[in-house]
Image (cartoon, rainbow, N blue to C red):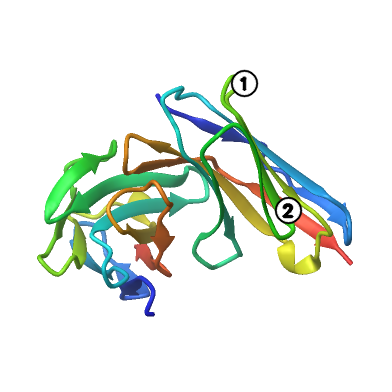
Amino acid sequence: QKEVEQNSGPLSVPEGAIASLNCTYSDRGSQSFFWYRQYSGKSPELIMSIYSNGDKEDGRFTAQLNKASQYVSLLIRDSQPSDSATYLCAALAGYSTLTFGKGTMLLVSP
Amino acid sequence: KAGVTQTPRYLIKTRGQQVTLSCSPISGHRSVSWYQQTPGQGLQFLFEYFSETQRNKGNFPGRFSGRQFSNSRSEMNVSTLELGDSALYLCASSLASGDYGYTFGSGTRLTVV
């Protein structure tokens, strides 16, 4: 069974802090990884993708991948209250099937 | 450009009925996937279509089926509805594969009573 595991949270951080979100995956064959943000009552929105070991930065977001440890993380710098949402980690199995974690709820307090 | 469009947004059905949900992908996108989201199970993959062919199927009973038309629009059908089918059904599209991630529609909220 291919699985993606995330801490459900909530992860609470003060405004301006760095939020660190983590996930692990079981399928060593997965090559592509994604972070989606989902606001309450809304659909998931793709915010980051990462395909190779190391870091990938996009604005305030940095995704990190370690295939040897089967570990993916997302760092959000200068967290804002508008970042409060559930963050979903996903691994691509094969070429078209995304396996999602259950998500980590992030709460950023002003 | 227009995003992924799902209709209807909300549905209330009675146990035993069947339901059809519709999804129009982003123009040019040929891969359409369907997911079920519930508070307990999270997002679970139902099936994926590409060029009118089902390429992948998740671990759901045969009551869940889908199809894709030549214009890439897709429908999913659930027959003999059960209370446990109450969920948010999300459609997502991509150009051809999931390599660059999928774009999700707003979803259809199905309530079975």
Q: Position of residue A61 (x, y in %)?
A: 70, 54
**In this orientation, which residue lies closer to the viewer: B80 or B93?**
B93
Disc 1, SS: loop
Q: Residue at x 42, y 51 (%)?
A: B100
**In this orientation, which residue lies closer to the viewer: B110 or B23?**
B23
Q: Quadrant of the C terminus of chain A?
A: bottom right
Q: Is residue A2 left or right of residue A36?
A: left
- 10 Å crowding of disc 1: few (<14), some (14-19), many (20+): few
Q: Position of residue A13 (x, y in %)?
A: 85, 52
**Relative vertical location of residue B60 with respect to residue B50 in this rendering, above or below:** above
Subunit that carries the residue with mark 1 = A
Subunit that carries the residue with mark 2 = A
Q: Is residue A58 left or right of residue A98?
A: right
Disc 2, SS: strand
Q: Quadrant of the N terminus of chain A?
A: top left
- The amino acid type, in three-letter code, at marker 2 is Leu
Question: Which residue is identified by label 1?
Answer: A69
Question: Which residue is identified by label 2?
Answer: A106
- 10 Å crowding of disc 2: few (<14), some (14-19), many (20+): many
